[in-house]
Amino acid sequence: MQRTSTIHIVDPDPLTINALRGLFPAHPPKFLAYRTAAAYLEQAEVDRPACVVCELSLPDRCGVKLIEEIRRANCPLPVIVLAANPTVRATVDAMIAGAMFVLEKPGDAISLQRLIKSALKQDAEQLQQCQELRQQSTRFALLSPREREVADLIFQGLETKTIAAKLGISPKTVEYHRAQIFAKMEVSNAVQLTVALLRLEKSRV
């Protein structure tokens, strides 16, 4: 963890919180603890990279419901479940809801430390991807309606002459729009444009 990371602990048990704090004695990340799901949802800071370590049995709601709420975010934090006596059904439900890992308390310290580091690394990578996607979305919004038409046809793999015939414009005009699209989207060829548009399309699903 080269830069400061944040570990959000959603658990009413102070022993669990202290045990998690003790996993990183040399270069401790920032720890924020919450006794309830509501406290986390109301108070959680957005410093990244970060991850959530939560109990399934919380005073105000089921931990699975909290995981579902966390995963609905545009760029959600990875969630590790550290639960007391989790049933097979609860474990399956947590994984379906989006938890990365489900461990039974107290958990092996070395394994838990490794999983948290993995979650923080994943969040750093995911955050970079989310930032790139937002930038691509902002660039796409700069395209004119005609440029979007041309971009969509390039995305479909059509050549300049075919695009010109389909839109009823000259190949030279298509090339002009093509250059404008590449400049606004900050790509240098049709392959890069296709990749950018594919990522945008997947993000809207």
Image: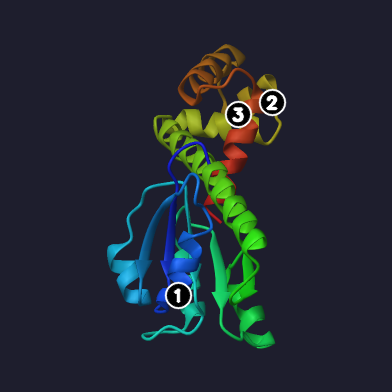
Query: Which residue was labeled with disc 3?
Result: 193
Query: On the rendered image, what quadrant is the C terminus found in?
Result: bottom right
Q: Residue at x 64, y 80 (%)?
A: 91
Mark 2: secondary structure: helix
Task: Report the amino acid beneath label 3.
Answer: Leu
Q: In front: mark 3 or mark 1?
A: 1
Mark 3 vs mark 1: which is more N-terminal? Answer: 1
> According to the image, label 1 marks what residue?
15
Query: In front of the other: label 3 or label 2?
Result: 3
Along the line of sight, which residue is nearer the eye, 3 or 67? 3
- x%, y% of residue 72? 47, 64
- Element type at mark 3: helix
Left or right side of 30 for 55 = right
Q: Is residue 69 visible?
A: no
Residue 2, given in percent of the width and then of the height, sits at: 51, 36
Q: Amino acid type of disc 1?
A: Leu
Indicate whether 158 appears above or below 45. above
Residue shown at 46% from the left, 23% from the top: 184
Name the image quarter holding residue 33: bottom left
Q: Residues within 10 Å of mark 2 (few under 14, many from 20)?
A: some
Q: Is residue 105 visible?
A: yes
As drawn, which residue projects farthest toward the left? 42
Dot 1: what SS?
A: helix
150 over 88 or under it: above or below = above
**Crowd tier of the residue under label 1, counting other residues whose Cα lies within 10 Å: few below 14, some 14–19, many 20 or above:** few
Render colour scheme? rainbow
Disc with the residue nearer the chain's start (3 vs 2) = 2
The image quarter containing residue 39 is: bottom left
**Marks 2 and 1: CB-CB under 8 Å?**
no
Which residue has dot 2 on it? 162
Give coordinates of residue 165: x percent, y percent.
64, 25
Task: Residue 16 in the image: state x and y as whole percent.
Answer: 48, 73
